[in-house]
Structure formats: structure tokens, C-alpha cells
Image: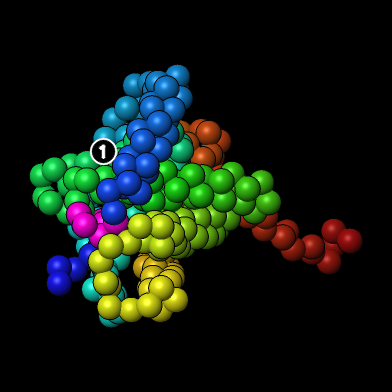
């Protein structure tokens, strides 16, 4: 059978479930668009284009999963959330998914609502929630930002994968070659590994941008990173 990626192909999920998630995705994206317009400016607009292009490139890398004819790939939700915020970030990922479905046939057009829900909405929302939480407790240093990006990436990818599992449970129509428990374990284990790879890429990219242009990192709100405290040696005469 044709390989099923995190981009869900037509026929994997039944029509009613796909339609319900399409309505949900449209509503969520409409909300994101309204919120994004409030903060869109000359800096954020071109940055959003660059983020979307980067996500499009990394999502073209698919990693085969050995059970159930499923493959996974990098998502980019955490990267988008850190650089352009949750509202614009979700729209960036959604635009990438629409182009991939309509132009490249990656993911079924009828399944767009499911794919957008998992990758653009759930993935970005979970990532931003973790970013907002972690940046309150970790040092605002390059290391702290890297840890934040890494953790947010891993967990956002895992949540997006579990979104597919839940959707398949609700309305799966195709035998993926494994029981539901095996599918869940395989998707979780594989996407943790994929998330680790995405976390390393996201952490490296965000820290690099933050060191040069902290104003381009939405998560920092233009505040530069602080250097870690370096203990000052005390000389004998200064005691």
C-alpha cells in the first residue's frame, strides 16, 4: 500500500471525522488570522515568509516507520512559534500543508483538516505553551533558549503524532497492518526520535538568530540573551 505519512492520505480516515476536523481547522485558522493581523508589521511579514519556506524544506524529509506503512517527518511548529509566535506560526505551517497537498500531492486534499489540526494547530499550540512556560524558569541565556527549543520541539512532534492516532481511533478506515496499541507505540517511539532531530535543528537555528538579531525571535520579544555569570577570582590582596 502507499506509504502513509503524518500527512494523512485520502481514505485513511472516514468522511464524517475528516469533515468535523476540517470545520475545526477552519475555525482555528480564522482565529489565528484575526490575532495575527493585530501584530503583523514590516518585520514579522518577511520573517513569516522565511519561516514558511524553511518549514516547507524540512517537511520534505520523510523518515520511514517500520510498522503500519507509516512515515514521519519534521514539523517545524516549535521553530515557527519561537520565531514568529503562535498565531502567525500556525498559519505558516498551514500554508505549507495546503501547498504540499495541492501541488505535490503530499497528504490528501480531503484530509487537510486532519493534517492542519495535527501539525499546524496542535503542534504549534503545544510548542508555544511549553516555550512560554520554560522561558519563565530557565535562564535567558543561549543554553536556556536551546533547552527550551529542544523540549518544545520533541513534545510538539509527539503530540501531533498522537493527534493522528486519536483521529485513526475515531474514524480509521484502512488496515495499517498493526493493532491500535502497536500503532500507538510505533508512532510514539518513532516520533520521539524524529522530535529529537527536530529539536537539535530548532535549537541551533533559534540560538543562532537570537545571538545576531534577538528582535527577530518572537519568544524573546526583542530582549537580547544574557551572558551566563562568570565568577570573578578573588586575589589574595583583595581579601
What residue would you read off at disc 1? Answer: 95
Residue 196, above or below 48: below
Which residue is depicted at the point 21% across and 57% down? 11
**Residue 10 quadrant:** bottom left
Residue 154 lies left or right of residue 48; in this view the side is right
Residue 5, given in percent of the width and then of the height, sits at: 25, 63
- Residue 154 makes an appearance in the image: yes
Residue 75 lies left or right of residue 62; in this view the side is right
- Residue 58 makes an appearance in the image: no
Q: Which residue lies furthest to the right in this view?
A: 239
Dot 1 alpha-carbon crowd within 10 angstroms: few under 14, some 14 to 19, many 20 or more: some
Residue 170, above or below 26: below
Which residue is depicted at the point 11% across and 50% down? 104
In the rendered structure, which segment of residues is drawn in magenta? 5-13
Closest to the observer: 223 or 180?
Answer: 180
**Residue 13 quadrant:** bottom left
Tell me which secondary structure the magenta stretch mostly adopts: loop
Residue 6, given in percent of the width and then of the height, sits at: 30, 60
Closest to the observer: 83 or 13?
Answer: 13
Residue 134, given in percent of the width and then of the height, sits at: 61, 51
- What sort of colour scheme is used for the picture? rainbow
Which residue is depicted at the point 15% across and 72% down? 1
Q: What element carries label 1?
A: helix
Closest to the observer: 169 or 155?
Answer: 169
Q: Does the magenta stretch include residue 61?
A: no
Amino acid at each position: 500500500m502507499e506509504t502513509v505519512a503524518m500527512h494523512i492520505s485520502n481514505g485513511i480516515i472516514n468522511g464524517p471525522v475528516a469533515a468535523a476536523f476540517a470545520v475545526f481547522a477552519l475555525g482555528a485558522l480564522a482565529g489565528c488570522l484575526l490575532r495575527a493581523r493585530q501584530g503583523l508589521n514590516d518585520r514579522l511579514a518577511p520573517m513569516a515568509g522565511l519561516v514558511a519556506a524553511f518549514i516547507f524544506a524540512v517537511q520534505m524529509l520523510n523518515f520511514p516507520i517500520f510498522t503500519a506503512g507509516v512515515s514521519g517527518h519534521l514539523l517545524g511548529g516549535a521553530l515557527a512559534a519561537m520565531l514568529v509566535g503562535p498565531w502567525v506560526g500556525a498559519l505558516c505551517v498551514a500554508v505549507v500543508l495546503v501547498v504540499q497537498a495541492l501541488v505535490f500531492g503530499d497528504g490528501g486534499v480531503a484530509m487537510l483538516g486532519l493534517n492542519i489540526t495535527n501539525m499546524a494547530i496542535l503542534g504549534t499550540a503545544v510548542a508555544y505553551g511549553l516555550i512560554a512556560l520554560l522561558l519563565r524558569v530557565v535562564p535567558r541565556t543561549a543554553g536556556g533558549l536551546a533547552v527550551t527549543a529542544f523540549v518544545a520541539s520533541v513534545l510538539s512532534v509527539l503530540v501531533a503524532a498522537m493527534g493522528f492516532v486519536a483521529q485513526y481511533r475515531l474514524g480509521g478506515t484502512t488496515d495499517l497492518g498493526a493493532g491500535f496499541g502497536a500503532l500507538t507505540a510505533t508512532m510514539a517511539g518513532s516520533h520521539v526520535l524524529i522530535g529529537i532531530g527536530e529539536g537539535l535543528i530548532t535549537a541551533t537555528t533559534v540560538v543562532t538568530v537570537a545571538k545576531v538579531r534577538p528582535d527577530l525571535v518572537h519568544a524573546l520579544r526583542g530582549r537580547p540573551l544574557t551572558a551566563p555569570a562568570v565568577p570573578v577570582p578573588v586575589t589574595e590582596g583583595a581579601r
